[in-house]
Image (spheres, coloured by chain):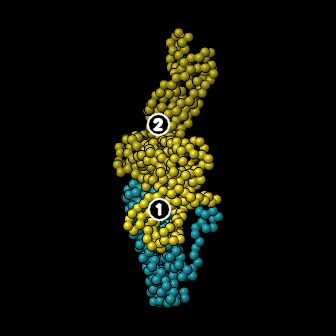
């Protein structure tokens, strides 16, 4: 029978933070003069009893050269919990060979030891996972150390023994954790071990993204964040505003608790149209929203300031006030509302007539809507309101 | 035989002691409240036994009766300086982990830190009264301050916080007893005989 040479694993590298095994092996393709289809079986085993956890079939094609093949596997259990073993074998579909064909022997198994001898604790350590995940936590301890129980939050779970120094619990459909995370506690005879897991949501796509400028100096974008992520502090959802035309990126300071979502972006010289992408991310996922806006059509100035009123006679007065901003090429239309003690209100529209550009502050003095209480000149009250058509 | 303390110094000492007793009492009440809030907020088991935490001064002391007044003050001062550093670290970790999520606990922690600092200063006042030099802070001599504490896992941080607050509450009780001891006139002469003598 045609039985291939037993394959050999070149490397087996664990990535503990992601509980992933990375396997590399050579296909010994140079031994065969012509390209052949090959099946590889990869077996993952666990615990001292080397129980088969999974067996996967992998396909490749020989190419007259030795090719290094690689394959990754993510465990449902932290790699620290127990030893993991990997072995492979192959079957070559040598069509030209008419006799019986069979699988090679299994390769010698490669082992990933769990934790260092003497190391103990609960794993995974301080992980962030999505709501609804099924989780496995293990408690690694000394061999002779009696384990009393393992709790997730305030609930005790049935333990599975993985080895003489490792027990595990399985938590299904995890719900969102509180602000300081959910504690996973392992009570041993004379010790307490634990870990914290943060269960939250990936960010929603931001809704109602809109941007406007009060002063042609800064653009203010607001949006509705959607469902809270349930993650705080260094795991909180972070926002950034990217403008495609200029390539400029701004990270936004958002207060996750009182949930006012505003981000400021500088008005750029000689740029009217802004192609914004609002990026949202947290350790569980990311999302984005985009908006194309002509900022000259999105002007919402603040109320005017520093109103001064001078009256040179009893029937005419001069008003002066400031709107902070850079309105160089903008045509401002202002409104005055005048009401006397007989509460008769007249609405007058006044075009700007006193325009001064002061370098470098770019302060403008301009007319805007004023509600004045007409009476004795010495008692002027003013309510400032700005309105633009 | 130590020189007898002047009446004004004795009066000043008793005043500082009684104010210190009130400060320690208030601090203890606030620490107990903070402890309850901390246990709940961190999802801990209030009855969890916490092994002695490295760097946390233990309030329990052997042969408490035999301590001199100066020993009492110096041990108290060293303890509250240690708690000041530990609470500042807890506050920093709290901000890092929770951001604005639980500002209430952060404010309560900051308030207790303030009281601990004030109490440490109060102890220094008592030592100055006795013209005792104020010992330098630990790490003053080292150029770049004390070595950074080992990086703990989040659960270890939570347990350490529990241990710190529990021990601080015990210290507040001990401080009240120590200060009452210091406030007593010396039995032998009937007059206050300074801190060195008074057990």
* Disc 1: CA contacts within 10 A as few (<14), some (14-19) or many (>=20): many
Residue identifier under label 2 = A75
Name above or below for residue A93 compared with residue A44.
Answer: above
Residue B101 spot, x, y in % from top left: 44, 55
* Nearer to the camera, A388 or B24: A388
* Nearer to the camera, A257 or B97: A257
Query: Along the horizontal axis of the image, is B95 left or right of B41?
Result: right
Instruction: Give the number of callouts.
Output: 2
Tell us which disc is closer to us: 1 or 2. 1
Q: Is residue A150 visible?
A: no
Q: Which chain is yellow?
A: A
Q: CA distance from mark 1 to mark 2?
A: 69 Å
Residue B3 spot, x, y in % from top left: 55, 88
Same chain letter for marks 1 and 2 = yes
Name the chain letter of the residue that bears numbered label 2. Answer: A
Name which of mark 1 and mark 2 comes first in the sequence.
Answer: 2
The secondary structure type at the circle numbered 2 is loop
The secondary structure type at the circle numbered 1 is strand
Identified at 45% across, 49% down, the residue is A231
Residue identifier under label 1 = A370
Identified at 63% across, 67% down, the residue is B141
């Amino acid at each position: 029978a045609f039985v291939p040479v037993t394959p050999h694993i070149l490397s087996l590298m664990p990535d503990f933070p992601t509980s992933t095994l990375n396997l590399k092996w050579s296909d010994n393709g140079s031994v065969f003069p012509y390209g052949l289809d090959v099946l590889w079986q990869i077996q993952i085993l666990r615990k001292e009893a080397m129980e088969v956890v999974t067996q996967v079939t992998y396909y490749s094609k020989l190419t007259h050269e030795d090719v290094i093949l690689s394959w990754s596997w993510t465990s449902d259990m932290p790699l620290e919990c127990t030893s993991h073993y990997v072995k492979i074998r192959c079957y070559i579909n040598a069509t030209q060979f008419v006799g019986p064909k069979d699988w090679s022997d299994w390769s010698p198994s490669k082992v990933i030891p769990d934790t260092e001898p003497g190391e103990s604790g609960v794993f995974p350590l301080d992980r962030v996972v999505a709501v609804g995940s099924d989780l496995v936590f293990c408690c690694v301890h000394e061999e002779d150390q009696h384990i009393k129980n393992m709790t997730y939050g305030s609930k005790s779970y049935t333990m599975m023994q993985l080895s003489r120094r490792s027990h595990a619990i399985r938590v299904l459909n995890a719900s969102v954790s509180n602000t300081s995370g959910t504690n996973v506690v392992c009570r041993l005879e004379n010790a307490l071990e634990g870990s914290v897991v943060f269960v939250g949501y990936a960010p929603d796509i931001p809704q109602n993204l809109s941007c406007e400028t009060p002063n042609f100096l800064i653009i203010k974008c607001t949006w509705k964040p959607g469902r809270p992520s349930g993650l705080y502090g260094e795991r909180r959802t972070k926002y950034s505003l990217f403008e495609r035309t200029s390539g400029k990126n701004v990270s936004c300071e958002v207060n996750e608790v009182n949930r006012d979502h505003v981000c400021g972006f500088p008005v750029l010289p000689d740029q009217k149209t802004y192609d914004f992408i609002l990026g949202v991310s947290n350790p569980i996922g990311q999302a984005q929203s985009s908006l194309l806006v002509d900022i000259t059509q999105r002007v919402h100035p603040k109320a005017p300031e520093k109103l001064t009123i001078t009256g040179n006679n009893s029937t005419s007065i001069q008003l002066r006030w400031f709107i902070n901003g850079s309105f160089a090429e903008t045509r401002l239309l202002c409104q005055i509302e005048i009401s006397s003690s007989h509460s008769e209100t007249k609405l007058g529209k006044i075009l700007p007539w006193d325009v001064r550009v002061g370098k470098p502050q770019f302060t403008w003095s301009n007319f805007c809507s004023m509600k004045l209480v007409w009476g004795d000149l010495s008692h002027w009250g003013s309510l400032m309101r700005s309105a633009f058509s | 035989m130590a020189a007898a303390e002047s009446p004004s110094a004795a009066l000043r000492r008793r005043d500082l002691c009684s104010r210190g007793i009130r400060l320690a009492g208030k601090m203890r009440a606030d620490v107990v409240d903070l402890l309850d809030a901390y246990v709940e907020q961190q999802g801990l088991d209030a009855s969890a036994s916490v092994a002695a935490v490295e760097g946390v001064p233990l309030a329990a002391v052997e042969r408490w009766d035999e301590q001199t007044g100066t020993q009492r003050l110096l041990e108290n001062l060293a303890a509250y300086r240690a708690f000041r550093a530990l609470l500042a670290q807890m506050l920093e970790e709290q901000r890092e982990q929770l951001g604005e999520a639980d500002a209430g606990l952060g404010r309560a922690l900051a308030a207790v830190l303030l009281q601990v600092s004030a109490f440490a200063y109060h102890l220094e006042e008592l030592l100055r009264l006795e013209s005792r030099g104020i010992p330098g802070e630990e790490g003053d001599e080292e150029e770049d301050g004390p070595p950074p504490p080992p990086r703990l896992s989040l659960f270890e941080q939570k347990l350490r916080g529990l241990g710190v607050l529990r021990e601080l509450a015990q210290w507040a009780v001990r401080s009240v007893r120590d200060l009452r001891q210091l406030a007593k006139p010396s039995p032998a002469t009937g007059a206050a005989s300074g801190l060195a003598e008074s057990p």
